[in-house]
Image (cartoon, rainbow, N blue to C red):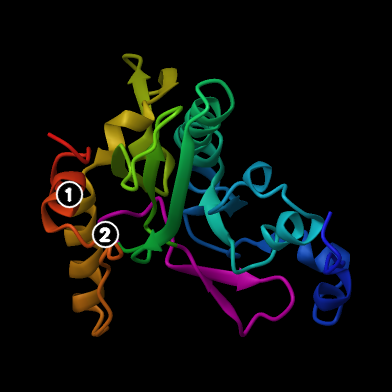
Amino acid sequence: MKSDDYQFNTQIEEYYLEEEYDKFDPPSSGTWWGPYFWPVRGHLSASTERSRSIKDLYSTFLTTNIVPQDKKGNGSVWSSFETHLQTNFKELQHKIYVVSGVYGTGGGQSNPNIFQEFQAQTNPEEKIAVPDKLWKVVMGFYKGSTSEYPDYAYGVLVPNNALDVLEIEYNNKGKPRKVTSKKWSDFRYTIKELETILNRDLEDSGESFEYDFLSNITDPQIKKNLKEKGQSFV
């Protein structure tokens, strides 16, 4: 426990009552809500991975780390990937660094199972943007590794909607007969591929910022290997 641990409750209560904080307000009309998108407070960084101190743990529940995430995706692909990372850390004793973020804004006729924005319970004039996808970049060191460079690195880009993360088998009347979750590895990318996707989105939105993961690695060949091949030495 660190000496600077403190409670975040007062910061939250300054703006929200507890019962208000607990709710998302669905739209009053339209066909998107019921069958397609049920939002939960999805963690970009899992709270179980930030247990170094009470302060670190509580910070994962602030809105800097929380996004509206489809419940079915949160409880399937996203959750299974976090479990994979935690297993590598706890059982295989890998040292792992993770960067997380969001991509795009959901909604539109081409993808009606995500809506672009919905109302905060506290103020109907305030809109909360729903991300189109969630991503992570992983850099890992194997047990006993003495290298200054990660042994492996890769990214994942997970759609924030049920239809893209679930396999749905229909019966002859068009109703779901069997629903299974896709594997997180179905959404695995090289870091170079993920960078290209994220930076294209930033360019389209007029942002001058660009992602450059592994920017502190000074050896150009090692950096290229990690970004394009997923390992430092090929």
Q: Residue furthest toward the front? A: 146
- Identify which residue is drawn at 23% across, 42% down: 189
Q: As rendered, which of 64 and 99 lies closer to the eye?
A: 99
Tell me if I can see residue 209 in this picture.
yes
Sequence-wise, the earlier of marks 1 and 2 is: 2
Main SS class of the magenta portion in the image: loop
- Identify which residue is drawn at 55% across, 63% down: 29
- The part of the chain drawn in magenta is 109-130
Q: Amino acid at mark 2?
A: Ile
Q: Quadrant of residue 186?
A: top left
Q: Which mark is residue 217?
A: 2
Q: Position of residue 39 (x, y in %)?
A: 58, 52
Say whether residue 55 is magenta. no
Compared to residue 47, the image places residue 107 above or below, namely below
Relative to 7, is 140 on the left or the right?
left
Compared to residue 84, the image places residue 33 above or below, namely below
Mark 2, secondary structure of its residue: loop
Q: As rendered, which of 166 and 52 lies closer to the eye?
A: 52
**Quadrant showing the C terminus:** top left
- The residue labelled by disc 1 is 222
Mark 1, secondary structure of its residue: helix
Q: As rendered, which of 205 and 29 lies closer to the eye?
A: 205
Q: Classify mark 2: residues with Cα within 10 Å, few (<14), some (14-19) or many (20+).
A: some
Q: Amino acid at mark 1?
A: Ile
Say whether residue 110 is magenta. yes
Q: Are marks 1 and 2 in contact (CB under 8 Å)?
A: yes
Q: As rendered, which of 35 and 208 lies closer to the eye?
A: 208
Q: Position of residue 217 (x, y in %)?
A: 26, 59
User: How far apart in space, not on screen, are marks 1 and 2 (Cα)?
Assistant: 8 Å
Relative to 56, is 6 on the left or the right?
right
Q: Classify mark 1: residues with Cα within 10 Å, few (<14), some (14-19) or many (20+).
A: some
